[in-house]
Amino acid sequence: MKKEELELFQEIAANATHLGEFWDKVLESALIVHGHLCGAMPLGFRAGRLALKALGADREPNMSKIALVETGVAHAAGCFADGVQLATGCTYGKNLIQKLDYGKWAVTIAIKKDGRAVRVRVKNEAVEAMFAGKFMDHRRKGIPPAEVPREFILDGFKKTITRPDEEFLEVSEIFTYTFPPAPKPSFNIGKCEICGERVAENKLRVKDGKTVCLPCSEYMK
Ligand SMILES: [Zn+2]
Ligand SMILES: [Zn+2]
C-alpha cells in the first residue's frame, strides 16, 4: 500500500465520526484490510452496522453471532461481504460469516444465545445507482477496482458513508433464526503419522491403523 493511499483512507475515515464512537477507526481498518475504494464494501459496512444497531448488539469479539451475507461468488459487488465482516466482527476466521450466494445486497445478523435476528437490505435505488455508475463501467471493461481512476468512486464512497441509514437501507422486524447444530470445537492437537504435521485432533482420521491428516488419508479425493 502506498503512503498516499493510506492517508486517503485515514482522511475518509476521519469524516465518519457521525456514525458513533470508534466507527471512524473501524472504517479505517476496513479500508486498509479491503484495500480499495469501491461501491459495495461501504454498503456492506453500513448494512452490518445498522443490523448491530437494530439488535442492540456490539461488534463481535467472540463467536456469539453470525452474518449470513446474500452476495456470493461470480457476480459484481461481492465486496459487500467484506464490509459486513469488518463492521460486525463476524469474520471468516471465526467462522461467523456465510455467503448465501443469492446475488442480493442484504445481510442477516443472528445472535446465537437467543436466536434474535435482523435482515438489512440495500434499497433497489442504491444498488441501481452503484451499477449505473462510472466505476462499474470500468469494472465491466475488466479494470481492477484499485486501478479505476479515483474520481469515479471517491464521491460515491463518501456518500455511502455519510448518508442517513433510512435513505438507502431497509431493516426488517426482529425475527427468530434457528441455528443448525454445530460441531464441538477441538482445543487439542495431534500429529499425522505420515506427513508429521500437527493437526487439530478432531480432523485426524485412521487409515490402515495409522492416525493421519485429511490430505494424507486420501478421504478427501
Ligand atoms: Zn471492493
Ligand atoms: Zn499428513
Image (spheres, rainbow, N blue to C red):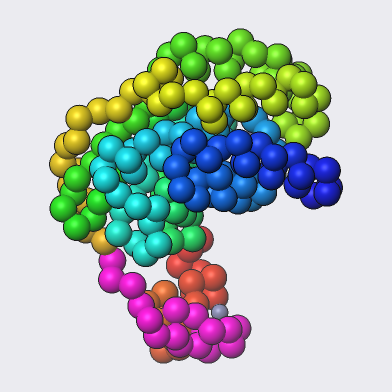
Q: Position of residue 37 (x, y in %)?
A: 68, 34
Q: Main secondary structure of the magenta part?
A: loop
Task: Identify the image quadrant of residue 159.
Answer: top right
Q: Position of residue 173 (x, y in %)?
A: 20, 30
Residue at x 58%, y 84% (from the top left corner) = 197
Any magenta on residue 192?
yes
* Residue 123 vs residue 192, the one in the foreground: 123
Give the left or right position of residue 146, taking residue 61 as reference: right
Query: Would you place residue 188 above or below residue 118 in this image?
Result: below
Task: Identify the image quadrant of residue 215.
Answer: bottom right
For ligand 2, which image quadrant applies? bottom right
Q: Can residue 100 be seen from the camera position used here? A: no
Q: Position of residue 90 (x, y in %)?
A: 42, 52
Image mark count: 0
Give the left or right position of residue 70, taking residue 214 as reference: left
Residue at x 25%, y 28% (from the top left corner) = 172
Q: Can residue 121 be seen from the camera position used here? A: yes
Q: Position of residue 16 (x, y in %)?
A: 55, 37
Query: Would you place residue 44 above or below residue 121 in this image?
Result: below
The range drawn in magenta is 183-200
Residue at x 19%, y 36% (from the top left corner) = 174
Give the left or right position of residue 111, taking residue 14 as reference: left
* Residue 179 vs residue 169, the one in the foreground: 169
